[in-house]
Image (cartoon, grey):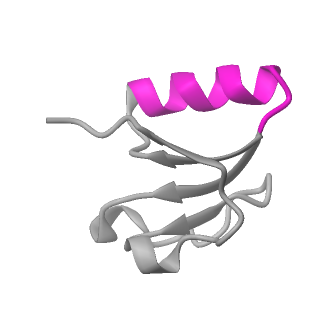
Amino acid sequence: MRLGIIGDGAIGQYVREKALERGHDIRALLLRPEHLPGRAKEPSGTVCVATVTELPDDIDLMIDCAGH
């Protein structure tokens, strides 16, 4: 399954790790704009974006792991 994750804190990183272990493809991380510098694309090919309009069209499921 092609996933997108909102947030990259402790919960987001855990969800990402477990999803990859189970063979899912993490297509995008939706992050705050101030967290984007230097992270346009992760080594795994995951795209980092700051707005919903920038998300790839082929994501099957978004998982909200953002903080309060």
Q: Is residue 44 above or below residue 12?
A: below
On screen, residue 7 versus residue 3, left or right, reads left
Quadrant assignment for the N terminus: top right
Which residue, as the protein is rendered here, is positioned at the far front?
A: 60
Q: Position of residue 67 (x, y in %)?
A: 22, 36
Q: Position of residue 57 (x, y in %)?
A: 65, 72
Q: Is residue 31 above or below residue 68?
A: below
Task: Looking at the picture, tell me which residue is in the foreground, 62 or 6.
Answer: 62
Q: Position of residue 7 (x, y in %)?
A: 39, 45
Taking the spot 13% from the left edge, 35% from the top edge, the residue there is 68
Taking the spot 55% from the left edge, 65% from the top edge, the residue there is 48
Q: Which residue range is magenta in the image?
A: 11-24
Taking the spot 53% from the left edge, 70% from the top edge, the residue there is 38
Which secondary structure class fits the magenta region best? helix
The image quadrant of residue 52 is bottom left
The image quadrant of residue 28 is bottom right
On screen, residue 37 versus residue 22, left or right, reads left
Which residue, as the protein is rendered here, is positioned at the far bottom?
A: 53
Verify whether residue 22 appears in magenta. Answer: yes
Verify whether residue 55 appears in magenta. Answer: no
Taking the spot 54% from the left edge, 22% from the top edge, the residue there is 14
